[in-house]
Image: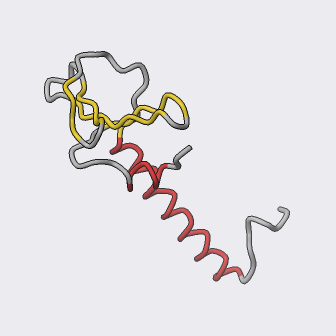
Amino acid sequence: MMNDRQILDNAPEGATHIEILAPTNVYYLKKYKNGMGYDIFLSNKWVISMSVISYARSLSDIKTIVEQQKRIEQLEKMIDRCLGFDYLEREL
């Protein structure tokens, strides 16, 4: 299963969403401008699809999550340097 960073790194140009049905069934999607459906990226090209997607994650939401995770890691390192120890490992 891909993590969020891998999802973003593997997204084709124009993708707006992703649907993961199983570890090996990953589909990148491009939402129609009218919001009523998606094109699906198959065999290195966009294919018109009128189907409704059951569970699609927004790539912009995934990007925000990845950015926030990176920022949290940076802040944790900064706190560790200021305190002189790993504050997450220390019992409170």
Compared to residue 79, the image places residue 27 above or below, namely above
Residue at image location 14% in from the left, 23% down from the top: 34
Q: Nearer the viewer, residue 6 or 25?
A: 25
Whether residue 76 sits left or right of residue 12 in the image: it is right
Residue at image location 48% in from the left, 64% down from the top: 71
Corner quadrant of residue 33: top left
Whether residue 65 sits left or right of residue 88 in the image: it is left
Q: Position of residue 42 (x, y in %)?
A: 30, 35
Q: Residue reaching furthest right?
A: 91
Q: Position of residue 30 (x, y in %)?
A: 24, 34
Residue at image location 21% in from the left, 35% down from the top: 46
Colour scheme of the picture: secondary structure
Compared to residue 44, the image places residue 90 above or below, namely below
Whether residue 36 sits left or right of residue 76 in the image: it is left
Q: Nearer the viewer, residue 76 or 32?
A: 32
Residue at image location 75% in from the left, 79% down from the top: 85
- Which quadrant holds the N terminus? top right
- Which quadrant holds the C terminus? bottom right
Count of picture labels: 0
Corner quadrant of residue 39: top left
Q: Residue reaching furthest top?
A: 51
